[in-house]
Image (spheres, grey):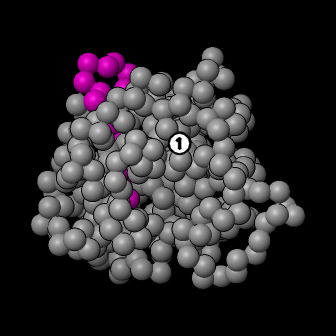
Amino acid sequence: MKYILDTGMGTELQERGINVPDWKQSIWSADALIHDPQSVREIHLANIEAGSNVIITNNYYVTPNILKRENLESDFTSLVQRSIDLANDAKSGRDGVIIAGSFPPIETSFRPDLTPENNQITDFYNDLLEIMKGQVDIIICETMSSIREGKIACEIALKEFDEVWLSWTTRGVDGSKLISGEPLEDAIMVGNEIGAKCQLLNCTATDLVTDHLETMKKANAFGAYANSHALKEPDEIEDLGEGVDADINHYHNCVKLSPEEYAKQAKIWFDEGAYVIGGCCQTGPDHIRAFVEIIS
């Protein structure tokens, strides 16, 4: 393993008592860039001190489509720049720490049905690339719910960056398909073809990552930053059907894990040769600390 990624910004802000508006109707964790940037910097620092050597810029949800919710479209460039500045400030003077610029979905997480036409997606990622080039070390295209958007994001990032990571997300209790319904294995093959340095799973249950390691290992390199929860026992899982609210689907059939329990799952990924490991929702610096301890 080469890299230890940081943890989920939105849920860590909430854990610290900071108001984070609902992710389905607002700018979510990006709100802290406006109202509490110091806390964003402090969380970056806490992850570095816990053992992370990769920090993701906090521009997830800083997209023109999402900023429209609060009439903030004109602040797109300045908010992305602020996320870069905060990450670079946190890593200042710390050798071996790199900054990953976030290429997020253009629309609400887990809603590939809302994704606009290709030309609009392309314009968004090109604009993001222009801001980030020369200011971050690598790009991570994260929480991609469809092959179409993930492919476009990754191809654009590769125009300026040699190291581009492409992270997919799955839903439900099976984990073999993206939210779009496309097989995870098909997504991995596409990522390999376009030259993604590493492909990951994020924002999914830890045991679903473990269950699909053989698929992930077909990538040029693989990694994961899961949520700190696991599926309930099979006889406790409820079939919610199709079209269920993403937030309910996200957590309904899961139980929360402690940092130590999360680290045990992550150790499996480590033992199987993961290139990068970190955490997504409901993880924090304590999860990184527990993981570093278990692999030491």
Residue sitting at the far front: 17
Horizontal side, residue 275 vs residue 252: left or right: left
Residue in the picture at 73% in, 56% down:
231
Q: Amino acid at mark 1?
A: Thr
Magenta residue check for 266: no
Q: Secondary structure at mark 1?
A: loop
Residue in the picture at 47% in, 25% down:
50
Residue sitting at the far right: 235
- Please name whichever residue, 10 or 224, is drawn nearer the observer in this view of the structure: 10
Vertical comparison of 99 with 109: above or below: above
The spot of residue 180 in percent (x, y) is 56, 74
The spot of residue 150 in percent (x, y) is 46, 63
The spot of residue 54 in percent (x, y) is 41, 34
Magenta residue check for 102: yes
Residue in the picture at 24% in, 38% down:
38
Vertical comparison of 289 with 182: above or below: above
Horizontal side, residue 27 vs residue 112: left or right: left
Which residues fall within the magenta stretch? Answer: 90-105
- Please name whichever residue, 247 or 93, is drawn nearer the observer in this view of the structure: 247
- The residue pinned by badge 1 equals 283
Vertical comparison of 86 with 128: above or below: above
